[in-house]
Amino acid sequence: FHHKFLIFNNKKTSFSCSYNYKLYIENTDKSRHSFTFNIDQHLGNYKHVYFKYFLMPNYYLREYADLDLGIIIDDIESATAYYSSTFTNEKVSLGYQHPIKRNRNIKVGILYEKQLFDKYFTEYDLKINGQFIQLSLKDKKHDVSLYYEKNVANNYTYLSGDYSTESMDRSYKQDRIKLTFKNKIDKNQYFGIIADIYNRENTSLIITDELHYL
């Protein structure tokens, strides 16, 4: 669904929302759905404010053993039993675009994300804060953009009292650089390239945390 109207100082406001559902017939547990809502507020002179919201609830991962449960009730069978693990992913972003010169603009913004797991695996829960900047150039033949994003993830359930949170901290810092280039060859033909690079640094200070230690 997409709609445009005048709401802010007689400037055009565009908003859209979409619902996506994927059905896996052979394993319906893997079926998932998501919701997206976007607002693009024009401010005039090629200036924009953008807002985006994304929600994907109860995404199925796989079956895992919950060691915490076995320790709490002192039952080896419960410790080795498998439970379905799901997580809910929620993202919010707010951005502002401003022109630099003709056909050139800069876009900056902030990001917030939550990854919340079900009751058996809350030790994986993350809250992620980030910022981004994007430089773009677009003319009749070329479309080029350089995007940089920095995120800091906080494993806020660390030391929540569960056994599994005592020895592992899944917090991290992450940098992302994305370069997009598209060149128009003729009316209906384009040539382009996309390079999308992530660099993640785990920030655990627990020496015995071999997977996440600095």
Image: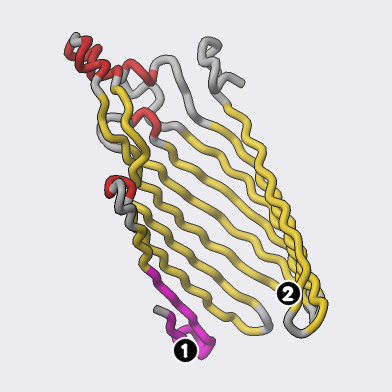
For the residue pair 108 and 140, the one nearer the viewer reads as: 140
* Residue 115 falls inside the magenta stretch: no
Q: Position of residue 39 (x, y in %)?
A: 47, 73
Q: CA distance from mark 1 to mark 2?
A: 22 Å
Residue at coordinates 76% horizontally, 68% vertically from top-left? 182
Mark 2, residues whose alpha carbon is within 10 Å: few (<14), some, or many (≥20)?
Answer: some
Q: What kind of residue is marked 2?
A: Pro
Kindly state the secondary structure of the residue where label 2 is placed. Answer: strand
Mark 1, residues whose alpha carbon is within 10 Å: few (<14), some, or many (≥20)?
Answer: few
Kindly state the secondary structure of the residue where label 1 is placed. Answer: strand
Residue receiving disc 1: 6
- Rendered-image quadrant of the C terminus: top right
Res. 72 visible in picture = yes
Q: Read off the magenta span.
A: 2-18
Residue at coordinates 82% horizontally, 77% vertically from top-left? 185
Left/right placement of residue 166 relative to residue 193 reads left
Name the magenta segment's main secondary structure: strand
Res. 101 visible in picture = no
In the picture, the disc for residue 46 is none
Residue receiving disc 2: 99
Badge 1 or badge 2: first in the primary sequence: 1
